[in-house]
Image (tube, rainbow, N blue to C red):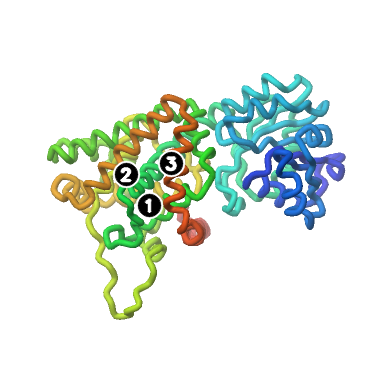
Amino acid sequence: MATTFPGAEDFVVGLIGMGDMGKMYARRLGAAGWRIMACDREEKYEELVQEFANYKNIQILRNGHLVSRASNYIIYSVEAAAIGRVVAQYATRLGAIVGGQTSCKDPEIKAFEEHLPSDVDIVSCHSLHGPNVDPRGQPLVLIKHRASDESFQKVETVLRCLGSKHVYLTAKEHDRITADTQAVTHAAFLSMGKAWHATKQFPWEGSRYVGGIENVKINLMLRIYAQKWHVYAGLAILNPEAHKQINQFAKSATELFSLMLEGRREELRQRVYAARDRVFGPEGKPTWEDRPLLPVELLDRFSLKPPSSAPTQPAPKTLPNNHLSLLAMVDCWSALGIVPYDHMICSTPLFRLWLGVTEHLFRTPALLDECLRVGVEDATFRRDDLHFTIAACGWAECVELGQFDTWRERFCVTQKFFEPRFKDAMAVGQAMIQAVLESDKREEQAGWR
């Protein structure tokens, strides 16, 4: 560990909450030489002691009282819905720095302001990626809410070992931007999973969902359902900025699907093309000359479908699809005046993939026109689209009513349905994300970005 401020060698980082992200932080900060004191619920104490027995810089304590008393910088890595209750339990060391790692800062900051004494500095953070993604080069939001420059510099020094790109925001800016880059994306994938669950199909096993765009849909849907339910519930329900977006996404999906069912082709086309122009710019404008965000052909190889035993058998033919989920997302952004490129510094790998395939669809006029034709004329995906629309409205209702229990039940029953394929999906998803990151790096080195 490089000592970059006086007393760094004795500086203790406390972690309250040892879920997947808490463990990732503990391992990486400990490996960088920082002294770590960590805890979770007391019933997990023995299990955590065994798990971290060979990490010399990490000490597991029984509870947050002990962690708070011993630590100079305390990070709460708990569910956003529980942060107020957890912070209220523990007395904080005089002069300490406190922050949180929740994905929604509104309840987190309110909890800190209510329960922390005025002599405690507040510097929050949020790594905008999952626990299994390499944090190097990924965005890390830092929020100097109530802190001296000295305290803020200490936090930056500690977290620099993650190798992430530091992004400086207020709590409100964080919630607005994460809503813009995550709320609609998550709603789309959650609704896909519910639709495929409702129709009892594993889409990678059939012949209808073939090709790069479908690979993204399937792999990232599985990636989301392989995570903890509360991550997505907290972002959607507790983030005030996300409510209008998830509601608009459900409205966009419903209205576009209705236009398809009613055969109102010209109205559908005008609406979709108007949304395209507002989000991506009209065809022929200078932005269309920019290099695409994602080389979609790169994604063709990332399928969960097992290779054919007959080497001479031709590859499955890609069926035309109306891609209702992509159309609805752009329609939603258009209605809310969101331009996703404005927040690329805070984008997650998942969002980059989803925006990349969406950009490909909307910037390929022939492909977009084919989607509209299929939506009106072809019933191949109509049952799936019906369940997708119903699911989108269901998630929106959960958010509007603040129903955490209903959200958990909806999520977990579908999670169980897809669970047997999570291991394979995570491996494929990691490879897909890595390929995209490597492509970005090559383009940056070539001066294209």
For disc 2, the marked residue is 325
In the displayed structure, does residue 178 sit left or right of residue 265?
right
Q: Position of residue 227 (x, y in %)?
A: 52, 47
**Residue type marked 1:** Lys
Label 3, secondary structure: give it.
helix
Q: Earlier in the sequence, mark 1 or mark 2?
A: 1
Disc 1 and disc 2 in contact, CB within 8 angstroms: yes
Q: Position of residue 50 (x, y in %)?
A: 76, 53
Callout 1 environment at 10 Å: few (<14), some (14 to 19), or many (20+)? many
Callout 2 environment at 10 Å: few (<14), some (14 to 19), or many (20+)? many
In the displayed structure, does residue 210 sit left or right of residue 179?
left
**Which residue sits at x=61%, y=30%?**
82
Label 1, secondary structure: give it.
helix
Q: Is residue 195 above or below residue 241?
A: below
Spatial CA distance of label 3 from label 1 is: 11 Å
**Which residue sits at x=76%, y=20%?**
117
Label 2, secondary structure: give it.
helix
**Residue type marked 3:** His
Residue 186's disc is: 3
**Residue type marked 2:** Ser
Spatial CA distance of label 2 from label 3 is: 11 Å
For disc 1, the marked residue is 217
Q: Position of residue 100 (x, y in %)?
A: 65, 34
Q: Please state which of residues 149 and 393 is positioned toward the viewer in this rendering.
A: 393
Q: Position of residue 10 (x, y in %)?
A: 87, 42
Disc 2 and disc 3 in contact, CB within 8 angstroms: no
Q: Is residue 300 above or below residue 81?
A: below
Q: Please state which of residues 121 and 16 is positioned toward the viewer in this rendering.
A: 16
Q: Earlier in the sequence, mark 2 or mark 3?
A: 3
Residue 102 seen by the camera: yes
